[in-house]
Image (cartoon, rainbow, N blue to C red):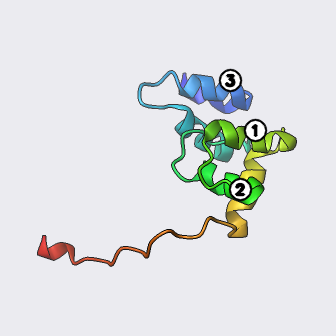
Amino acid sequence: RLEEAVRMPPAAARERLELVSGIGPWTSAETVQRSHGAADAVTIGDLHLPGIVGFALAGDRHADDAAMLRLLEPYAGQRHRAARLILLSGRVPPRRAPRMPIGDIGRL
């Protein structure tokens, strides 16, 4: 039954995918973005994406999924593409701390 999702509209394909245990909104959005070219399938539940979009569009590095969706409303129909262009722009919040040093895993 999953193979039928290939011929479905993106929203219906996401619903079909989410019927499988362990596949949620994040996985279904990422899948239809690639399989269907879904230009409006925004990735919900991502750890960094809302903060990056919030910072780029409103200067809010602490934006959550709801705030991200509000900021992307003017791009309805192309919200995934807008978020992707923001990611590719490199306009991300500045780091708050230096990167962790790369440790030698062999010493664990």
x and y percentages locating residue 53 in the rendered image:
69, 53
Mark positioned earlier in the residue sequence (3 or 1) = 3
Question: Horizontal placement of 74 versus 106: left or right?
Answer: right
Judging by the rendered image, the residue that carries numbered circle 1 is: 70
- Local SS, label 2: helix
- Local SS, label 3: helix
Residue visible at 66% across and 33% down in the picture = 6
Task: Kindly identify the amino acid type of the residue bearing the numbered disc 3.
Answer: Ala
Q: Residues within 10 Å of mark 3 (few under 14, many from 20)?
A: few
Mark positioned earlier in the residue sequence (3 or 2) = 3
> Can residue 68 be seen in the rendering of this structure?
yes
Q: Who is closer to the viewer here, 5 or 56?
A: 56
> Can residue 41 be seen in the rendering of this structure?
no
Judging by the rendered image, the residue that carries numbered circle 2 is: 84
Task: Give the alpha-carbon distance from disc 3 to disc 1, as whole Å.
Answer: 23 Å
Q: Residues within 10 Å of mark 2 (few under 14, many from 20)?
A: some
Judging by the rendered image, the residue that carries numbered circle 3 is: 12
x and y percentages locating residue 85 in the rendered image:
75, 60
- Res 26 → quadrant: top right
x and y percentages locating residue 20 in the rendered image:
46, 25
Question: Horizontal placement of 66 versus 75: left or right?
Answer: left
Mark positioned earlier in the residue sequence (2 or 1) = 1
x and y percentages locating residue 47 in the rendered image:
51, 49
Q: Is residue 33 above or below residue 8?
A: below
Which image quarter holds the C terminus? bottom left
